[in-house]
Image: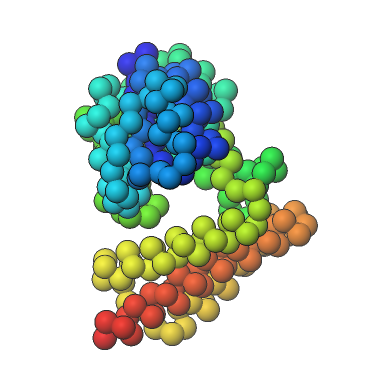
Amino acid sequence: MEISGLIITFNEEKNIGKCIDALLKVCDEVVIVDSFSKDRTVEIAKEKGAKVVEQAYLGDGPQRAYGLPFCKNDWVLNLDADEFIDKDAEDFILSKKYLEGNYDAFSFRVKNFLRDKLIDFSGWYPDQKVRFFNKQSAHFSDAVIHQKVITKNEKKVSVHILHYGWDSYDQIIAKKNQYSGWHAQQLYEKGKRINAFKPVLNGTVAFIRCYFFKKGVFNGTDGLAMAVIQAFFSYVKYVKLLKIQKENK
């Protein structure tokens, strides 16, 4: 198995052991880029046999890119510490189907869970992401939030990553709020400028899309909650962008 597993971490002692174990089913090495965790993340990773390098957090894309030179193999399977490959993704990789055709990256479907409940509504599924790629011709973008893998020839496959990212709505809201600030700053640096109507418009559209067109309405209070959270993220992101515009006027 000439595949390197790559994970970026910060205080992930709860998940890192299980994530490494899952990666080692299909990888012959695991590389951890840790942002100076204060818990047992590094200790556990080393006990599991992972290669650990430490780097102050550079942003989502740059942090992942920092780890690529430490990966000895061309093919890289990049997961977050709270993600695991499903059995269908494991079978896809072990069967070496990724070598069929001239593809340099594969986009997997992500199943997001709130505790043990699958969120397959309000636009949360299929959450398609490139997690498996050849570093010789594909690479991480420099986005500090929601980075993408830049590829020459990507293929979408119907296999899955399991993402156990949150135990409560409080955690989802806190993370969305944090991301909204980073995303607003990123938009500003890319030259995005908006008017005062943009936050309300985008928040409203996000709610309508997630609740009515993405099956939220058929999933009770969870469907309503997820639609409201998506609308909140869209609204707050542009409110923060407006604030940055005014501060730099």
Percent of width and height locating residue 169: 65, 57
Q: Is residue 127 above or below residue 157?
A: below
Q: Position of residue 119 (x, y in %)?
A: 65, 47
Q: Residue furthest right?
A: 220
- Residue at point 75% right, 54% down? 219
Q: Residue at x 58, y 61 (%)?
A: 173
Which residue is located at x 51 percent, y 18 percent? 91
| Image x and y of residue 215, in percent | 68, 54
Is residue 84 toward the left or the right of residue 63 in the image?
right
| Residue 61 visible in the shown view | no
Residue 148 or residue 145, whichever sits in front? 145
The picture places residue 27, in percent across and down from the top left corner, at 40, 19
Query: Which quarter of the figure is the N terminus placed in?
Result: top left
Q: Quadrant of residue 105?
A: top left
In the depicted structure, whether residue 226 falls above or below residue 105:
below
Which quarter of the rendering shows the C terminus? bottom left
Q: Is residue 114 left or right of residue 199?
A: right
Q: Is residue 81 left or right of residue 133?
A: right
| Residue toward you, 56 or 81 | 56
Q: Residue at x 33, y 37 (%)?
A: 33
Q: Look at the image and tell me whether residue 222 can be seen.
A: yes
